[in-house]
Each structure stands twice: as C-alpha cells, then as structure tokens.
Image (cartoon, coloured by chain):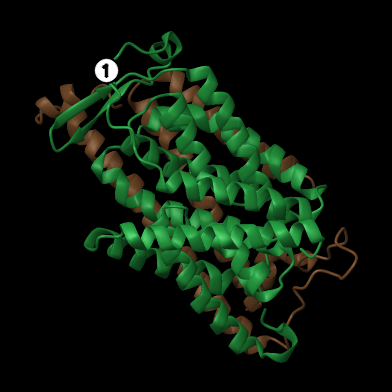
Chain colours: A brown, B green
C-alpha cells in the first residue's frame, strides 16, 4: 500500500485513490466503534454487576499455594455459556460479553485487511493475513480448556 | 496495600476505577501503554493474584491499542504490510506464551515482568538516532515481501528500505511470547525489533507496533478467557478507567512539555518494577 502512495496521491481523480481513502476510513471507524461498543456494554454490565453482587469476591492468591488458581466461574469463560447468562441480565456475563467484543475488534480488523489486500490484488498479503487470522481462530477452537 | 476484605464492592470498584485512570495517564505519557501499569496497581496495590492482574492487563492492552490505532490510520504512517508480516511471528509467539504462562510459577512471572518493565522504561527515555540514512539499499527479503515504504513528514515524503528482515522476525517471535506470558503489549520489544534491527523510521515503527499490539493481545486473550484469568469485577473498572486516562494522557502529551514528567514516571515505573521483582524473589506474588 505504502509504495503506491505517491502514485495514487498524484492522481486524485483515480478510482484507487478514493478507494484507499475510504478503506482507511472504514478501518478507523471499525476500531473506534468496536472500542466504544465494548466500553458501553462493560459499563452497563458493571452497574448491574455491582447491584447484583453479594459481597467482595476473593482475588487474593492462596497463601503458600501459588500453584493453585480457581479463576472465574466456569460459565464466564466461554461465549456459549456467557450468552444465555447475558439474556438473564447477569451483570458479570454482560461485562464478559463486552470483553469478547473488545477481543473481537482487532481480529475483525485483520479480516478486513484481508479484503483490502484482495481488492488491491496483492495475493501474497492475502495469504499472509489469512495465516495470521488462522492462528488466532484455530487457537480459539482448539485452545486448551 | 489496600485490604480487600474491609471494603465494599462499590468502594473497591471506585478505587480501582480511579487507579486505572492514573495508570492510563502514566501509560500514555511514558509510551509504555496502559496494561503495563495495571499489573503493579493490582498486585502491589490491591494484593490481587498475579494471574487476574495479567488477564486484566491483556484486555486493557487491546482497548488502548485499538483506541490509538483509530487515530493513526488517518495519518497513513502505519505500514500495514510490515505489521501483518510480523504479526505471523507475534501471534504464534503469543499463543505459545499464553500456554507457557499456565505452567509458570507466578513469582517467576513477576520477576520477568519487572525485568521487561525496567527495559521498557529505559527504552522510552533513550535518545532517538536521527542520523540513519533510511534510503540505503535494504534486505532482498524486504524487497520480495514488499515491506519497503514511505511516509509523509513536514519536510516531504521519506522513503525507507527495510533491513535484517529475518532478525526482526525472530525478535518479534520473542516479543510475542513475552506478551503472551505477561499480558502486556510489549511495545518496547516490538519497537526495538523494527527500529534497531530492521531500521524502520521511529514514527513508522511506533505506529506499526501499536497496530500489532491489539492483534497479538487478542491472540492470547482467547486462551486467558478460557482459563478464567479474565475477571469481570476487575475488567469493568480497569478497561474504562485506563481508556479515560489514556485519552487525557495523550491530550497532555500534545499540549505540554513532558520531558520532566516522562522522567518522573519512568523512575516511578522502575521503582514499581523493582518492587515486583523483590516480591517475586521472596515468593510473595
């Protein structure tokens, strides 16, 4: 993309020039909306979470047993258990959903870049981008549970 | 340290939120990123388990990186090809790092974190080398991968040729592993790989590094979520607080002379890093 900058910038009437501008605009919007949406969901969930909570959760490490870790409740670890809890207006699940939206934002951006490279007919980078996407998605599916 | 058993959840969330705003500001002003300051805040300040702290930091890194990237794209400095090519190294590294972290004692993680933090603080204060001729012929691999590029400056368009692609790629794998273990963007290591190794101009390497932080963090975040390291009670005040803090931090960065401020914060971060290492060695974290 960068090498073609001068060529494209010199011809502001070219289709490529405007196409490029628009793509950058979309990527910027995608990132901004993603972060805003995640923040909004998280704050909303946070308010409900505080109202629903029954006392302070324990975040301390177990003294003398640093190798043991309980972690958060099981239903807050997977999207397919977060969503049903979310529909029951569970505050913690709403926050986790906001976190999932946040994690999805850069991943969507990578997917979007693949499309941009495809439009530019830069097939080498379509492959590179798809490899990056594959690493993330395979990890999501086959990751250790 | 604040005793968690004596406070209500409302007070705890509020204190955490305000701490996160401060962490976001320090992160933006030092250029270290918000996630980095969250770990000592949670472990040293609140006595939270290292693993929860790492989970919260990781989510924060994604938020601040994506927020800042939205602004950089319009300026067209980020080299998306370099970013995506090196992303192959960092995402694989991040997944490996996140898996390694599961079996690593938390005090070892604390010591490693302290070391990386001191290194990052030193990197943020170092003088930028302005005398490099970026137009010198670069690596053959860089040409084949179409990594060379140009970016706009006040004095016109600067073209640059990328060097030592293989070395940069290897160093990026290491950066990925470290961000997977520690839940931080390890931006300093990424900049080191691009700036020192590949001789990419500073502005391009910092913005491209920022672009990469979110993707790298997202790769390991999935493992962290599945392992129960990401706690909602910590995530909501921290993510929102750090984003607000980072926003104001970047405004201060634009308007004020921040050299002294940067210095003070770098010293603060170094002290925190030493304290983390000390507690790690004693096995308290």
The answer to whether one can see residue B175 in this image is: yes
The kind of secondary structure element at disc 1 is loop
> Which x, y percent locates residue B45?
63, 74
Identified at 65% across, 45% down, the residue is: B180
Does B73 sit left or right of B11 as displayed?
left
| Of the pair B143 and B26, the residue shown nearer to us | B26
* Quadrant of the drawing holding the N terminus of chain A: top left
Residue B99 versus residue B196: which sits nearer the camera? B196
Q: On what subunit does the disc labeled 1 rest?
A: B
Identify the residue shown where x is 49% and y is 60%. B267
Q: Position of residue A121 (x, y in %)?
A: 36, 20
Residue B55's place in the image compared with B215, above or below, is below
Residue at x 54%, y 84% (from the top left corner): B14
Q: Is residue B214 visible?
A: no
Q: Is residue B256 above or below residue B183?
A: below
Q: Report crowding for label 1: few under 14, some 14 to 19, many 20 or more residues within 10 A (C-alpha).
A: some
Quarter of image, res B282: bottom right
The image quadrant that residue B272 belongs to is bottom right
Residue B125 versus residue A21: which sits nearer the camera?
Answer: B125
User: Looking at the picture, does residue B9 appear above or below residue A22?
Assistant: below
Frontmost residue, B113 versus B228: B113
Q: Is residue A74 left or right of residue B196?
A: right
Q: Quadrant of residue B48?
A: bottom right
What is the x, y in percent for residue B135? Answer: 27, 17
| Residue holding disc 1 | B135
**Residue furthest top in the image:** B140
Q: Is residue B148 left or right of residue A7?
A: right
Q: Give the total of numbered labels.
A: 1
């Amino acid at each position: 993309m960068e090498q073609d900058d001068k060529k494209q910038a010199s011809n502001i009437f070219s289709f490529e020039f405007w196409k490029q501008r628009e793509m950058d605009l979309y990527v910027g919007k995608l990132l901004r909306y993603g972060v805003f949406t995640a923040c909004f969901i998280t704050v909303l969930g946070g308010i409900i979470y505080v109202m629903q909570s029954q006392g302070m959760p324990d975040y301390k490490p177990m003294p003398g047993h640093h190798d043991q870790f309980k972690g958060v409740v099981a239903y807050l670890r997977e999207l397919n258990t977060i969503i049903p809890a979310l529909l029951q207006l569970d505050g913690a699940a709403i926050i986790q959903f906001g976190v999932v939206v946040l994690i999805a934002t850069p991943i969507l951006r990578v997917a979007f870049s693949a499309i941009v490279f495809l439009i530019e007919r830069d097939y080498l980078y379509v492959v590179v981008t798809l490899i990056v996407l594959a690493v993330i998605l395979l990890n999501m599916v086959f990751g250790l549970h | 340290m604040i005793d968690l058993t004596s406070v209500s959840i409302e007070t705890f969330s509020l204190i955490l939120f305000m701490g996160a705003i401060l962490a976001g500001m320090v992160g933006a002003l030092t250029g270290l990123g918000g996630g980095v300051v969250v770990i000592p805040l949670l472990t040293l300040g609140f006595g939270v388990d290292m693993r929860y702290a790492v989970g919260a930091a990781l989510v924060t890194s994604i938020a601040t990186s994506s927020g800042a990237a939205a602004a950089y794209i319009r300026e067209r400095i980020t080299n998306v090809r370099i970013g995506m090519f090196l992303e192959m190294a960092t995402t694989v590294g991040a997944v490996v790092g996140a898996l390694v972290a599961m079996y690593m004692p938390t005090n070892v993680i604390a010591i490693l974190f302290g070391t990386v933090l001191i290194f990052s603080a030193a990197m943020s204060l170092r003088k930028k080398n302005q005398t490099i001729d970026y137009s010198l012929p670069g690596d053959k691999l860089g040409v084949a991968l179409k990594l060379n590029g140009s970016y706009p400056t006040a004095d016109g368009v600067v073209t640059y040729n990328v060097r030592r692609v293989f070395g940069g790629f290897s160093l990026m794998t290491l950066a990925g592993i470290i961000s997977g273990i520690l839940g931080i963007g390890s931006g300093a290591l990424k900049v080191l790989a691009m700036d020192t190794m590949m001789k990419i101009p500073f502005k391009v390497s910092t913005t491209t590094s920022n672009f990469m932080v979110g993707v790298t963090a997202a790769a390991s975040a999935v493992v962290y979520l599945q392992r129960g390291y990401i706690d909602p009670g910590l995530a909501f005040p921290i993510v929102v607080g750090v984003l607000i803090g980072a926003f104001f931090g970047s405004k201060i960065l634009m308007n004020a002379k921040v050299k002294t401020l940067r210095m003070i914060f770098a010293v603060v971060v170094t002290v925190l890093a030493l304290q983390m290492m000390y507690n790690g060695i004693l096995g308290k974290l």
